[in-house]
Image: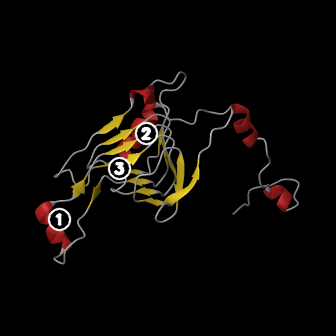
Amino acid sequence: MRFRSASQTREELETSLKACRRRPHSNINKGKLIFSPAVFNTIGSETNVVISRFSILDNTGSIHIGPWCMIGARARIYTHDHCHQGQEPLLSVQERHGVFFQDKYIGSDVWIHENAIVLYQASILPDGFVLGAGSVLTKNPGAYEVWGGVPARKIADRKKMSPLEIKNLFTGEGFSLKDYLHMETLQDTEL
């Protein structure tokens, strides 16, 4: 079985970006979306990234995205935050002073899984970083670390593996519903 490219075509990427890129505070700042040139330099692929059209990229500040990144459905990456200090009405503070914003750097081979949130406070997502599904990142992680939870914390390191070790990860059998239910074949339930 030949595996179809997992990365997006340039057209698919452009369509996703039209849907997911936001500038909620464009009256304060209009950040830029900057892709590493390496995103477009993979032989046989138009790009080497996947950004879900259901994600949210807050472009109040600028965002850099490196090659081989994946940003999953409903993942949210924020470059702004609101002032939550003092005891006067917070909306009044925002109307007078605006919001905090800063840029965000996303390195190479960074995966931000479905429903994960990267808050304003996390400004550098280094090479090889993985953020688990549903996690909330509040600070900068290290390179090749896996973080998960609310708030997110380091749960593992991505260790170096040989091509054979990686191939062997895919040879084991996973859970089989057919075996578990003791059935010869599985069929869709007709409704």
For badge 2, the amino acid type reads Gly
> Could you tell me which secondary element the residue under label 1 belongs to?
helix
Q: Which mark is residue 94?
A: 1
Q: Residue at x 18, y 70 (%)?
A: 91
Seen from the viewer's position, the closer of residues 159 and 138 is 159
Q: Earlier in the sequence, mark 2 or mark 3?
A: 2
Rounded to the nearest angstrom, the CA distance separating label 3 from label 1 is 22 Å
Q: Earlier in the sequence, mark 3 or mark 1?
A: 1
Residue 184: x %, y % from top left: 88, 54
Seen from the viewer's position, the closer of residues 31 and 144 is 144
The quarter of the image holding the C terminus is bottom right
For badge 1, the amino acid type reads Gln
In screen coordinates, is 36 left or right of 148? Answer: left
Query: Is residue 132 shown above or below 191?
Result: above
In screen coordinates, is 118 left or right of 113? Answer: left
Answer few, some or many: residues within 10 Å of disc 1's Cα (few below 14, many 20 plus, some between 14 and 19).
Answer: some
Answer few, some or many: residues within 10 Å of disc 3's Cα (few below 14, many 20 plus, some between 14 and 19).
Answer: many
Query: Is residue 82 shown above or below 124?
Result: below
Residue that carries the numbered disc 3 in the rendered image: 123
> Could you tell me which secondary element the residue under label 2 belongs to?
loop
Residue that carries the numbered disc 2 in the rendered image: 107
